[in-house]
Amino acid sequence: MESNQLTRMIALCLGLLVLIACERAPLPQPSGTQSPTPSSTGAATEAPVITPTAEVTTPTATIIAETATPLPTPTPLTPTPTAVPDTPTPAATVAATQPSTATATLSPALSPTPTAQPVSPATIAPGQRDTASLAPGEFNVYTFNAEALQPVLIFVETDGRLDIAVAVYAATVTAATDLAALTPLAQADANAGGGPEILTFVPNAAGAYSLVLRAKEATGDESGQFILYLFDMETTTADVAVRETDTLAAGQVNTYTVQSNGNGPVLVWLNPAGQADLIVRVTDESGDVIVEGNFGGPGAVESVYVLPRQTTTYTIEVLEASSAAATYDVMIVTLE
């Protein structure tokens, strides 16, 4: 019995020694789950499952220095100013820099103020012409110089839409002049609805005169154009076809032949010497009388015009009303 106890004690000591030896031996590092190792007999022997002792490894922090884009330096904020009421602009400045929104109200008793009047009268001389536009109620002013008792010949042609009145004044006329307060020295307003106007003015004294062209009406209240021609008996231009001083024997008839420039107007002026009473008559190629003038009486200038539809040859006849002898100046103009 004692031998059995001794045997157990020896076995127990041996077991403790083996256990101590195992604890001191280094354990293999696990590499994961091991595949079964085949035995010589071909049977798979499972490796013992070893539970590794968890080691706590404190990782060393690796700092990687990256090139960082620097942030923009913040711009100091400008404080928003407190709104201050605007200083009133002087009235004179407002008128010069801001468009007016006021609507002008016209008195029913007043005609509309012309909007296309010249600031100062234009100057025109014999042999010159001018083209412009006018709307109803507007007028243009021209100044011209004239010699005493020397006729000034005025002809105005329109585009067919204007009814123009022509007048000559001794006073200086501007855009601010009230024409109704003036008395014209000569005027022409014979043709309504776009017809031409012809006027002969014979001044009593040399000097400057105002010529006014006023648009009375326009078809459809539209603006229209006109051409103004100014002539005298002394100035010749390319438009003048005949300019002569002639005489008439008692009972004689003088004739002149001219051809129109297409459908351009043909103008005829006669200026008698003394108190001769002249008649002017215009006939066409067929001998038909187109126009005849004897408007002024003894000693007066006579003027007529013809508006051909095409190039036409005209015959101008001049005779004395009482068949007396006479001397006169004649000028015939063919306009384009």
Image (spheres, grey):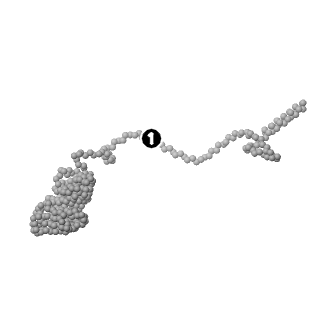
Place of residue 331 in the rendered image (x, y in percent of width and height, measured from the top left): 18, 65
The picture quadrant where one finds residue 14 is top right
Q: Which residue is located at x 26 percent, y 52 percent?
A: 221
Which of these two is toward me, 193 or 76? 193
Judged left or right of residue 7, residue 252 is left
Q: Residues within 10 Å of mark 1 (few under 14, many from 20)?
A: few
Q: Which residue is located at x 80 percent, y 45 percent?
A: 43
Q: Is residue 119 above or below residue 249?
A: above
Say which residue label 1 marks. Answer: 79
Which of these two is toward me, 112 or 58? 112
Counting every numbered tag in the picture gives: 1
Judged left or right of residue 67, residue 8 is right
Check disc 1 and give the amino acid type.
Pro
Q: Is residue 34 above or below residue 334?
A: above
Element carrying mark 1: loop
Place of residue 244 in the rendered image (x, y in percent of width and height, measured from the top left): 17, 68
Judged left or right of residue 149, residue 194 is right
The picture quadrant where one finds residue 24 is top right
Question: Visible in this render: residue 237?
Answer: no
Judged left or right of residue 26, residue 107 is left
